[in-house]
Amino acid sequence: MDWVWKAVLIIFVGTIILRVAGRKSISQMTLSQTVIMIAIGSLLIQPVAGKNIWVTFGVGAILVVTLMLMEYFQVKFDFIEQFLTGKSVSIIENGQLDEKNMKKIRFTVDQLEMKLRQANVSSLEDLKSATLEPNGQVGFEWKDDKKPATKKDIADLKQQIETLNQLLNPNISTQSAPIEASENIFKEVETKKHQQIHPDRLQ
């Protein structure tokens, strides 16, 4: 039964260690974060094979503290961030692929297209610029004529239409009908309660 309590303790302490280390997914991690997380995962299983469990937890804690110190120094010193994490690299500039940078980082057009399809981008010609981020994600900017309308754009257009309508029909009142507020699931995080009543079994 010795391995049973070890396994339970490993899961409990391992969860705490990884919770302290952060909640980023693998795709969002930097190289140093990924290396340390893999090291912690490999380390945590060792006590089941007979290694000292408390030494394992101690080493795991040291790894997490090291990670936190590395992240702190990256915030304080730009050259450390550039060395450990790297900087974003331009891969599309002024609507044109930057072949030099793509060759330098060994990033193919097929890989770029795959990531853009996942972001619902259907054509490279629609993009003004794009960058490959240190975590492997692609950031991009639409061309001006391809950018979706924002809430402000729509509000400005609505205001212009109402002004024009008022000039053409000065006797007609342009009063907007009130819009009913819908449930905001982000607001629930702040208030810590549901805005609409749900069955107890689903809460």
Image (cartoon, rainbow, N blue to C red):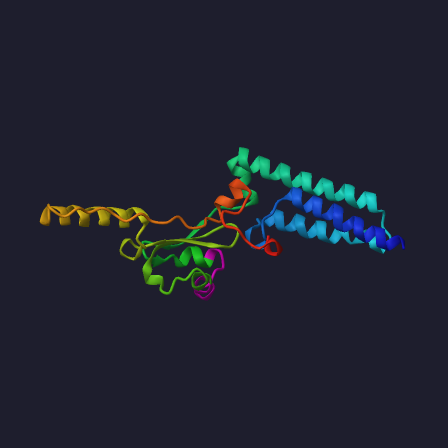
Quadrant of the image occupied by residue 92? bottom left
- Whether residue 161 appears in this view of the structure is yes
Q: Is residue 69 left or right of residue 108?
A: right
Q: Which residues are magenta?
A: 104-114
* Residue at horizontal 60 percent and vertical 53 percent from the top: 200
> Residue 61 placed where, x, y %?
73, 41
* Residue at horizontal 49 percent and vertical 56 percent from the top: 105
> Residue 123 placed where, x, y %?
35, 64
User: In the image, is residue 114 above or below residue 53?
Assistant: below
Given residues 170 and 138, the one toward you in this image is 170
Kindly give the residue lying farthest to the right in the view shown.
1
Q: Is residue 112 magenta?
A: yes
> Residue 47 placed where, x, y %?
82, 51
**Main secondary structure type of the part rendered in magenta:** helix
Callout count: 0
* Quadrant the N terminus occupies: bottom right
Kindly give the residue lying farthest to the top in the view shown.
76
Q: Is residue 191 left or right of residue 33?
A: left
User: In the image, is residue 184 above or below residue 115?
Assistant: above
> Residue 37 placed where, x, y %?
66, 50
- Whether residue 82 appears in this view of the structure is no
* Residue at horizontal 78 percent and vertical 50 percent from the top: 10
Q: Is residue 80 magenta?
A: no
Given residues 162 and 179, the one toward you in this image is 179
